Each structure stands twice: as C-alpha cells, then as structure tokens.
Image (tube, grey):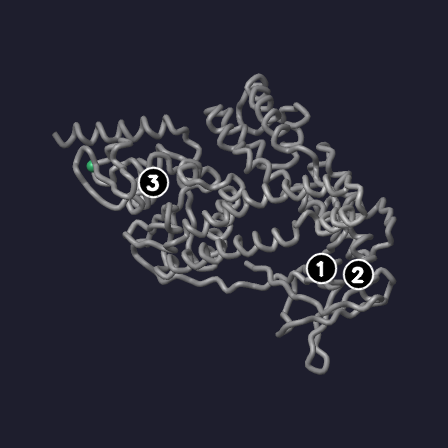
Amino acid sequence: MTRTVKWLSSILNTGKWATVLAIATAYSLQKDAFLRTLARTVRWADLDKPRAFRNRDKESRVNLWKLPVHLYDRALFDAVDTMRRWILAAIDQAHIEGKLFRAFEGPQRRYAFWLLRKFVRIGAALRGEAPEPKFEISLAQRQAVVRLLRRLLRKALGKSPRVHLRRSFELDNTLYRFFTHRGKPYLSIASLVPGQRTVIPLKGFPVPAVTGNVRVVLDPRKHAVAVHVPVPVRVKTLPDRREPVVVGLDAGVTEVFADSRGNFYGEGFGLVLDRLSARTTAQGAERNRLHAAEKKLAAASQAGERQKAGRIRRFNLGRVKLDARRARGQAEVKRRISEALREVLRFRPDVLVMEDLSRMRGRTKSRNLSRVVSRWMRSSLKERAEFLSQAGGSRLETVNAAYTSQECPKCGYVHRDNRQGDRFHCRDCHFTGHADTVGAVNVERRHTDPELRERIQVFTPKEVVLKSLREIFERKRALST
Ligand SMILES: [Zn+2]
C-alpha cells in the first residue's frame, strides 16, 4: 500500500512554466475527450477493462494534441479512473446499496448487488436493460430491480465529470526521473517535443525512490508545481495469537472515540468540530455579505467605490482567506482523528470494529454540526480508519450500529431510557456504565456474537434490528426463568 507525499517545486522560470502549462493543457484536452466518450453508458464495459479499451483505441488513435504515447495512455487511464470514482461516489453518497438491500430480498437482492459489481451492468441498468445473470431469476423480477436502481442512479449521478481546470497531469515512470545535482533535488519530465525533457527544481529532501505514477499539479498563482508522489507504506505484522484481539469503537460526542475496554481517545474533539462547524456556517454568511457589498459598490457613481468592488471580485469574494482558514480547521480535525486511531492501534488489535460510517446519522444529528462538516468528518474518519488500520496490520470491520446506544450489553434489554446523557443504566438488570463505552461494547458484540452477526447486517433496517434484539432478549429471559 502507498500514501501520497507532495513535493513542491521552486518558482519556475518563464520557459519551464510555459512547458508544464502546455503539457497540462494538452493532457487535459485529451482526458476531457476520453471523458466525453466514456460518459455514454454503452461504453461502460471500458471502465471494467481499461486495458482492452486502450488496445482498441490504439488501432484508431487520433492524437490531436500530439501527446507522447505514454502521456496519451495516462490521460486515458486517468479518465477511466475519474469516471469510476464518480460512479462509485454517487452510489455511496446516495446509500444505494442500503436502499436496494431494504427494497428486495432473495434472488432480487442478489441480482441488485450482482448489477452493482460491474460498471457494464450499471450502464445497462441506466439504459433500462436487465442483463441476465447465471442464477435463476425471472425477467419481471429483474426488471423491477432495474427500475428502482435506474431511478436511484439517475438522481444520484447528475452531470458526468469533465475537466474544467487544465492544471494537472499524470506521468508514468517512463516519463519522469528524480535526480540530484550538486546536492539539489530535481525532477526531469518529458515535454511535448519528442526527445526533449524539462527539468524542474524541487524543494525539500530526500528525493524519493519512486516507481509508480506521479501527478504534477500546477499552481498558476505561484508559477510552481506540486508533485504528488506515491510512497510505499510498511505494513506491520501482528503477533500470532490463539484468540484474536477485537476492539470495538464508538464515535463519541466529546471525544473522537470510546473503545470497548473503557478507554477514551481524543478528548476535546467535540470543541474542535464545533469551531469548524461555526466557521463553515459563518463562511457562507460572510460570502453572501461580500457579494451584496460588491453589487452595491459596482453600481455606485464614484470611481473609488467601483474600484473597491473590483478588488472584492479580484479576491474572489474573500474566498482565498476563508478557504485557508477552513483548511487549517480541517487539518486540525484530521490530525486529531489520526492521533486517536494511532493510539487505539497501539493495542495491535486483529480486528477493529466500527459502525458503518456512511450511515452514521443519529449521533451527528444530536450535535449541532453543519451538514457539510458532518459529512466531511465522517468521510475523513472512514478514510483514516481504513488507511491506518491496514497499515497497522489490523482488519477493519463495519457493523450496523442501530440501537447500540440503547442496548444493555449484559442482558440485551433495549430501551431509550437506558441512556441518559453520558450515563447508561439498564432499566431491567440495573447494569450501569459510561454510555459511550457501552456503545463500543455493543458495536464489538455485533461482530463477535454469532447470532447478532447473523441477524443484524450492515443494511438491515432499524425496525428489523429492534425486532431481532427484542426477540433475542425475550428468548434468553424465557430460558433463564
Ligand atoms: Zn440489562
């Protein structure tokens, strides 16, 4: 596995800047041409098999912008990648898997997930076709699944992606070379002129030992570039154990998490989130205020006033400054999340169990977070948890967390009154504990308890979760009396 490190260049002279700008422009035009082709759903088989797409394209290639062959290929693969990410993000954000899971059962449910497994099938569904799988299912049943999937996808997808800013390009390892000269680091890249390379002076050391694709991102404000380099991450190996170590985590209200052993990580996190949330909301309001002021000044009779309007416009309605402030806030949140996760991983657990973060709704509702921050925080948490647990050699498992805050970990009794703020007090067996710790224990049980694991899956609807928990509780009670 790899992580991305950004290498900054020094300010480029006019000639070098013109060269990288020309590459970025040609590359972006080519990538955009591929994106337009791939926007047609009949081409989505190409998203499943990009190599076949490349080989077919090679035979009828019209290299309009005269890109070197490898750069042309990169633009193709880059476009495929952008399309795939666009489709997968839409499916994820619109909770399409969960909706299909809840809408269908048996072979229809199986069919729905079979469709989602390949882009070519997703494309077919978008055209209203119902491709035939290898397992038994009638045409009418297939069509019913396709109707719902098509409706959900159309709503979720919106406009297909295009390249709007021509300011980045990808290079494979035939197109670049890092080297040092008189103690200084450089990156040499192929230009659009065959056989001619351009050398970019870099800041920072040491020059990375890179073999993968790198992305060059232009900064027109500074006439400099950032080189995004994949750096290998050493994955830790865990000791051999007879019993796997399992740790459940619960996203807390004031801290980043509580774990199932009674520990708390990243206390004070709630305050950081509240600040970021307030800032994000204020940022919208501030921009509206500036926009109104700019309009008023632009219509003024005095030249001085109109100049002021021009300045507001030039500074993008204050966006640069506000974006920088928000970026600092976001960096702080990410740092706290990473710190908390690293601390958890010090136990070197075999399995880390968390709730399905794309569905973490209830808890963030209880906080006064702006929707933007809440969604962003969840995706950061998900991304960091996936990355850090993998690097630490642990396996990340996600579970359905419905009612984990109201369920007694000892007797299984579920009631909303079991939780009062930070305290958990079972109304049935009088077990007490910290509410977030109880939540984490229950999250862990959803993975380790065979019956809970069988009956409560990630997409199981809340009502069914509650029914199952009550049935299990009643049955255990009947057995014990
Ligand atoms: Zn109880």
Q: Nearer the viewer, residue 233 or 342?
A: 342
Name the quarter showing ligand 1. Answer: top left
Label 1 sits on residue: 216
Report the amino acid beneath label 3.
Arg
Distance from Cα at disc 1 to Cα at disc 3? 44 Å
Q: Is residue 174 visible?
A: no
Residue 228 bears which disc, if any?
Answer: none
Quadrant location of the N terminus in the rendered image: bottom right
Task: Work out whether mark 1 precedes mark 3 in sequence or the reverse, and give the earlier one.
Answer: 1
Kindly identify the residue that appears in the image at 72 percent across and 56 percent down.
170
Q: Are marks 2 and 1 in contact (CB under 8 Å)?
A: yes
Report the amino acid beneath label 2.
Val
Residue 446 bears which disc, if any?
Answer: 3
x, y (%) of residue 100? Answer: 51, 28
Label 2 sits on residue: 20
Would you place residue 231 above or below residue 58 in this image? below
Residue at the outermost top position? 140
Distance from Cα at disc 2 to Cα at disc 1? 9 Å
